[in-house]
Image (tube, rainbow, N blue to C red):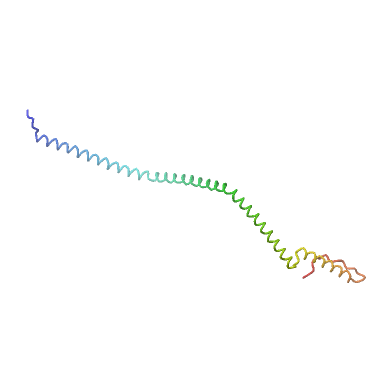
Amino acid sequence: MNDKPDPLKAAQDAAASGQRFSRGLADSAQQIWLAGLGALSRTQQEGGKFFDALVEEGVRIQEKTHAFAQEQVQQARAQTEPWVEAARKRTTAAMGKLEQAFDERIARTMQRMHMPSQSDIRDLSERIDALARELRASHAPAGKPRTASKRTKPKA
């Protein structure tokens, strides 16, 4: 019995092991290559379906986003509407007071300047109309009484 390893057998074993490793590596590379080809083929076949699925998902998300935005707008409007209405009422009241103060100031200024008011002019116009009617009535021919004119304002 020889305890010494046989160099020829060791070389043969190493060569066989290298061949097994090379075959395993080649088989793995072949499987990876085939998997890549399969993925490419499936992507080409189902790419349109996948794209359509993405579009459908995008539409659903857009609808959800739009609904959420509309809801947020409604909530904001509901929260701000009472405040806006109160501000509108305060503004209207303030404008009314401002207009009234302006009108009163103008009226006082016109009184100080001894300018007639609208009612003074109306009263004077009515008195002139009455005097004109009396004058026409007094100048009517003796046999033919004139009727008073229905006009309230003299021709300009």
**At which x and y percent is residue 50?**
39, 44
Q: Nearer the viewer, residue 106 or 31?
A: 106
Which quadrant holds the N terminus?
top left
Which quadrant of the figure has residue 152?
bottom right
Residue at the image position 68 percent from the left and 59 percent from the top: 101
Position of 11 relative to 130 (above/below)? above
Q: Residue furthest top?
A: 1
In the image, is 10 to the left or to the right of 88?
left
In the image, is 137 to the left or to the right of 114?
right
Q: Nearer the viewer, residue 135 or 140?
A: 135
Position of 3 relative to 156 (above/below)? above
In the image, is 103 to the left or to the right of 140?
left
Residue at the image position 37 percent from the left and 45 percent from the top: 47
Which quadrant of the figure has residue 25?
top left
In the image, is 66 to the left or to the right of 91?
left
Q: Residue furthest left?
A: 1
Which quadrant holds the C terminus?
bottom right
Q: Residue furthest right?
A: 143
Residue at the image position 59 percent from the left and 49 percent from the top: 83
**At which x and y percent is residue 30?**
25, 41
Which quadrant of the figure has residue 34?
top left
**At which x and y percent is residue 22?**
19, 40
Position of 144 relative to 65 (above/below)? below
